[in-house]
Image (spheres, helix red, strand yellow):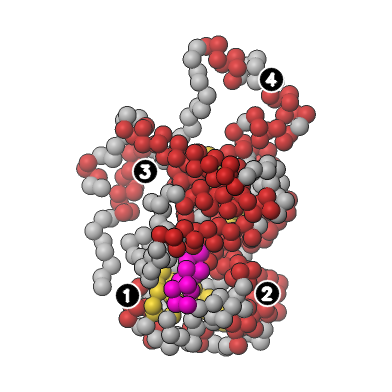
Amino acid sequence: MPEQKSIDWYSVSEKLHKFYGGKIETIPKVPVRTLKDFAIWYTPGVAEPSMRIAKDPELSFEYTSRWNTIAIVSDGTRVLGLGKIGPEGAYPVMEGKALIFKYLGGVDAVPLVHRARDPEKFLELLELVEPTYGGINLEDIESPKCFYILEEARKRLNIPVWHDDQQGTAAITLAALINALKIVNKDIKDVRIAIIGTGAANVALYRLLKLYGADPKKISAVDSKGILHPDRPDIDKLMVSNKWKYEIAIETEGGGKRGGMPEAIEGADVVIAASKPGPGTIKKEWIAKMAKDAIVFAEANPVPEIWPWEAKEAGARIVATGRSDFPNQVNNSLVFPGVFRGVLNVRAKTITDEMAIAASIEIAKFAEEKGIHEDYIVPTMEEWEVYPRVATAVAMKAIEQGLARKIMTRDEIYNMSREIIKATIDKYKLLYEKGYIKDIPKEVGV
C-alpha cells in the first residue's frame, strides 16, 4: 500500500502561516464599555489587587489570569523530526501547541523560546518567570538534558511542570496499551515488552509501565547500540552520561536478552517503538517472530518504523502509529490539554506520574465505553468530550495526593472543565462565522 500524498501539507502550511501571520493572539476577557472602565482594569483601581497580591502572592491565582496561563518553553534543540533548529525555528511548533491547548483545554498558553541551552541557565529561566504562570509545558528539548531539566524543575518550582515529549507521549501510549491488552486478553504483569528507542518518550513510558504493573524483568529496551543490560561494555559510561538509561539497564537486566532489535522483538507480546523513522527500521520478519496476538506501536513521525499493513501482514493483531491518516493514532494531544485543564482548576503544585497514569486510565475508559476494537483503542482529537474527563481524573488525583491548592468535588471539576472547553470552542466558531477569523483562501486548495 503506497503512502498517500494527495495534499502537500508542507506547502499548504507554509502559505497559511504567512497568510495569517501566526496562529494565536491575545484578546481581553473583561467588558470595556466606556473610558471609565479603564479606571477599573488599570490605574487607579488596579492598585488594590496589586497591593493584596504583594501581601499574599498566592492571591495572584485569584486576581489575575495566572491561574489559567502556562508557558510552552523550548530551546529548540530537538524539534519534532527536525532536530536542533533553534528557538526561532521552534516558535511555529510552540504556537501550534498553544492553539491546541486553548481549543481543546481552554488553557491560555504562550510560546517562550529561548537561547539558554545550558541546563542550569534553562532552569534559572524557569525560576525567574515562575511568578507569571500557573504551569510550565517543556517542549522539544534534546535528550538526556530533558530528563534532568524536568526532574529539577519539578523540585524547584511550585507550579506544575510537564514535559510533553516525555509524559504526554508516555501517557497516551499507556492508554492505548491498556485497551490493546483488553482486546487480546493479556495482563500487563505477564506480557513481554520490547521498547525500541530510549529517548524522552520511551524513558518516561518505562517509568509509567513499572508504576502501572509491568514486570521490568520482562522488558527489553533498545537504544542505538542494542539492548540495554548490565553487561554492556559502555555500562560504566552510561552511569555518568545517562543515568536514566543506566537505571533501565540495571532494573530490566535486558529482559533476559542480549543483542539488538531482532532479539528484543522475538517472542515479545508488545513492541513500542519511538525511534528512527522508517519504513524499514523494524522489519516484517522480526514482527513475524513475536508472540501470538502481537501488539505493535510504531510511533515515529513522519513515517512509522514499519508500515501498519506490513506489521499486520507479519502477524500483528493490533497496530498503532503516531499518524492521523492510519487507525489508532497515539498522539499526546489527547493528553496535555486535559492534564493542564485539571491541574489549573485545582491549582496543583506539580504533576506526578500517578496523575499521568490517571489520565491514561480515563482516556482508555472513554474509548472502551465507545466500543474498542482492533482499529479503535484510543479516542481521536475530534472527540472533545474526553478532555473534561481527563481533567477531572487528573485533578482528583492531585487532591488525593495533597498537591492541590484548591479543593473541589468531582462534579465541580468536571462541570468547570466542560464549561471552559465548550465555551472556548463556541467562541472560536462564533469568531469564524462572523468573519473575525478569516477563511482559508480558496486558492490554497484545502
Element under label 2? helix
Question: What is the magenta segment's predominant secondary structure?
Answer: helix
Callout 1: few (<14), some (14-19), or many (20+) C-alpha neighbours within 10 Å? some
The stretch drawn in magenta includes residue 183: yes
Left or right of 219 on screen, residue 430:
left
Say which label, 4 or 1, has the lower sequence index: 4
Say which label, 2 or 3, has the lower sequence index: 3
Quadrant of residue 60 in the image? top right
- In the rendered image, residue 164, in percent from the top left (x then y), is placed at 55, 56
Q: Residue at horizontal 31%, vertical 33%?
A: 433
User: Which mark identifies residue 17?
Assistant: 3
Confirm whether residue 290 shows in the render.
Answer: yes
Say which label, 1 or 2, has the lower sequence index: 2
User: Which mark identifies residue 418?
Assistant: none
Residue on which disc 1 sits: 309
Can you say whether 430 is above or below 445 in the image?
above
Residue on which disc 2 sits: 247
- In the rendered image, residue 343, in percent from the top left (x then y), is placed at 61, 47
Distance of label 1 from label 2 (alpha carbons): 35 Å
Q: Amino acid at mark 1?
A: Trp
Callout 4: few (<14), some (14-19), or many (20+) C-alpha neighbours within 10 Å? few
The range drawn in magenta is 175-185
The stretch drawn in magenta includes residue 310: no
Q: Residue at horizontal 48%, vertical 87%?
A: 266
Element under label 1? helix
